[in-house]
Amino acid sequence: MLHSPRHAGGATRSFRQSFLVAFATRIGERLDGAADAAVADVAHEAQQSLLPVLRSASERVETAFAEAFPALVTKSIRCPTAAVADS
């Protein structure tokens, strides 16, 4: 059997520690990349699938509002205190 010299133990430990740190760093980079890709996929799918739902809900709200308040009109008003507050 081959025996390593006693002074090589520190070098082996240092090499193992460096290897594990580099390995863990690389795994972290790959996981970050996979997470970013998954988030991008979900965001794209959600944007595609939620827009019609949100548009439909908005239209229903506007219809219900128009039915509840048929005589409602939008008007602009002037408020003299607003000009003072902006100064």
Image: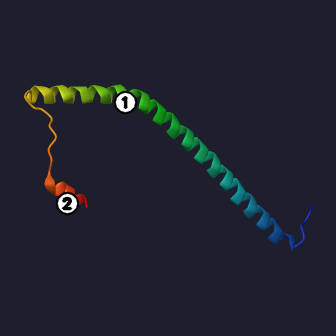
Disc number placed over residue 38 in the picture, else none: none
Image-based side of 16 in relation to 85, left or right: right
Image-based side of 58 in relation to 16, left or right: left
Rounded to the nearest angstrom, the CA distance separating label 1 from label 2 is 43 Å
The amino acid type of the residue labelled 1 equals Leu
Which residue is located at x 16 percent, y 40 percent? 76
The x, y position of residue 16, in whole percent, is 76, 62
* Nearer to us: label 1 or label 2: 2
**Label 1 or label 2, whichever comes before in sequence order:** 1
* Mark 1 surroundings within 10 Å by alpha-carbon count, few (fewer than 14), some (14 through 19), many (20 or more): few
Q: Residue furthest right?
A: 2
Which secondary structure lies at badge 2?
helix
Vertical placement of 83 versus 40: above or below?
below
Which secondary structure lies at badge 1?
helix
Q: Are marks 1 and 2 in contact (CB under 8 Å)?
A: no
Quadrant assignment, res 8: bottom right
The x, y position of residue 59, in whole percent, is 24, 26
Which residue is located at x 18 percent, y 25 percent? 63
Quadrant assignment, res 55: top left
Disc number placed over residue 50 in the picture, else none: 1
The amino acid type of the residue labelled 2 equals Val
Nearer to us in this view, 83 or 15: 83
Quarter occupied by the C terminus:
bottom left
Nearer to us in this view, 3 or 35: 35
Disc number placed over residue 84 in the picture, else none: 2
Quarter occupied by the N terminus:
bottom right
Vertical placement of 11 versus 60: above or below?
below
Which residue is located at x 14 percent, y 51 percent? 79
The x, y position of residue 26, in whole percent, is 68, 51
The x, y position of residue 3, in whole percent, is 90, 66
